[in-house]
Image: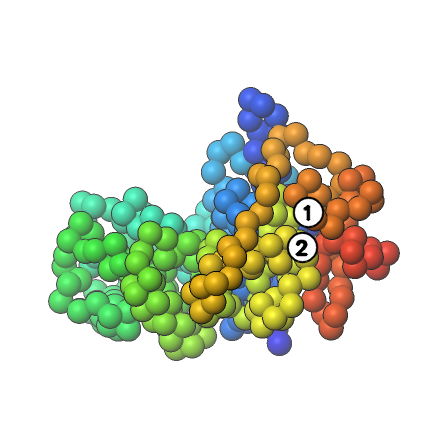
């Protein structure tokens, strides 16, 4: 399979009055074409910061301080002339004008709250026109409307509602519109940041099914950011479990749910209510995530880990390859053979 996105040793820091917090700490990942990678973990673990870094949209006072974010593109992309080599571009090296050409067209981002992302003063039709004309100034309006109709119909929205305003839609419908706008330019990579937040389970299931269908139709590669492991079980090919800005485990979805390796991944799965076994006692993770402005020595999870050893309190484990290609950062699995780019 062809690697579409390669993240190498990415570090993102937030400068605050209390000190510097590492929102993403030396993360390395690869994403192959036409696959879906899930990013999971507790709030504040770095999921959204990692997603926004790919778009160079880390909010102030955040800053990418090191690493590479390489993406496979077309050599003929004119606005990247001089910075693209053999179809590969390092997103971190791009200036704002170059990023504007990349955003939406090559990489699309679906934000958490559609009501704050959509302009309440313009219709859905105008939203589509603005996005399309920003990248294709000479495109005919008939083509824009035709593409919008096709996308909205695939998301269960009646085409005639294209002239409505955002406030005339329900929360689920607005989220569908946001997904539709993300697909308008046929991007190679779609990053969905909590796309089903605050929606009821029935609407959530419908949207996930529609997104899965459109992913196949448009040959999309996806990064799905969520704290809901049940969502990833239905949609993701692989899952990266993040904690305190680092990747603790990266496994196929099936392997992770069948046999989680990292104690944190196991604890997350055990804390999910199981309606099929109501007699099962609900588990939780003791303690709280660490203060990133005052990092502790060793593994950041060690104060909450039931398997913590002396080495866990002094040495930070590398992300190593185990069990047929799975990656885990835990001293329970050794550490002498480091996964090279972590």
In depth, the one of 277 and 117 nearer the eye is 277
Furthest-top residue in view? 17
Q: Secondary structure at mark 1?
A: loop
Q: Residue at x 24, y 60 (%)?
A: 173
Tell me residue 60's x, y (percent).
Answer: 48, 34
Mark 1 and mark 2 lie on one chain; the one further toward the N terminus is: 2
- Circle 2 residue: 263
Label 1 close to label 2 by CB (< 8 Å): yes
In-front residue for pair 303/162? 303
| Residue 291 in sight here | yes
Work out whether residue 68 can be spotted.
no
* For residue 186, above or below residue 249: below
Q: Quadrant of the N terminus?
A: bottom right
Looking at the picture, how far across and down is residue 52, in whole percent?
49, 48
Q: Which mark is residue 305?
A: 1
Side of 338 relative to 108 (left or right): right
Residue shown at the point (67%, 55%) measured from the top left = 263
Q: Residues within 10 Å of mark 1 (few under 14, many from 20)?
A: some
* Identity of the residue drawn at 18% across and 49% down: 167
Residue depicted at 56% across the width and 59% down the height: 269
Marks 1/2: CA–CA distance:
7 Å
């Amino acid at each position: 399979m062809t690697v579409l996105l390669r993240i190498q040793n990415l570090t993102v820091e937030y400068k605050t009055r209390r000190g510097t917090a590492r929102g993403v700490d030396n993360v390395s990942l690869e994403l192959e074409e036409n696959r879906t990678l899930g990013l999971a973990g507790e709030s504040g673990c770095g999921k959204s910061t990692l997603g926004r870094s790919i778009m160079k949209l880390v909010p102030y006072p955040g800053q990418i301080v090191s690493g590479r974010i390489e993406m496979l593109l077309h050599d003929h992309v004119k606005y990247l002339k001089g910075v693209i080599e053999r179809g590969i571009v390092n997103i971190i090296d791009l200036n704002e004008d170059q990023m504007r050409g990349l955003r939406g067209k090559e990489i699309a981002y679906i934000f958490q709250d559609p009501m704050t992302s959509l302009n309440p003063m313009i219709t859905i039709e105008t939203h589509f026109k603005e996005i399309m004309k920003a990248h294709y100034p000479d495109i005919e309006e008939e083509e824009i409307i035709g593409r919008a109709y096709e996308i909205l119909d695939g998301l269960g929205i009646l085409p005639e509602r294209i002239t409505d305003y955002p406030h005339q839609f329900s929360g689920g419908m607005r989220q569908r519109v946001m997904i539709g706008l993300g697909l308008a330019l046929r991007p190679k990579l779609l990053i969905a940041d909590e796309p089903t937040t605050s929606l009821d389970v029935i609407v959530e299931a419908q949207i996930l099914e529609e997104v899965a269908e459109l992913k196949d139709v448009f040959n999309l590669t996806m990064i799905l950011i969520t704290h809901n492991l049940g969502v990833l079980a239905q949609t993701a090919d692989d899952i990266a479990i993040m904690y305190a800005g680092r990747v603790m485990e990266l496994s196929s979805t099936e392997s992770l749910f069948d046999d989680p390796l990292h104690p944190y991944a196991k604890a997350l799965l055990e804390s999910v209510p199981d309606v099929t076994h109501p007699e099962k006692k609900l588990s939780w993770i003791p303690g709280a995530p660490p203060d990133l402005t005052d990092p502790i020595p060793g593994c950041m999870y060690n104060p909450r880990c039931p398997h913590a050893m002396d080495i866990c309190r002094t040495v930070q484990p590398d992300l190593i390859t185990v069990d047929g290609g799975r990656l885990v950062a835990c001293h329970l699995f050794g550490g002498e053979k480091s996964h090279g780019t972590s």
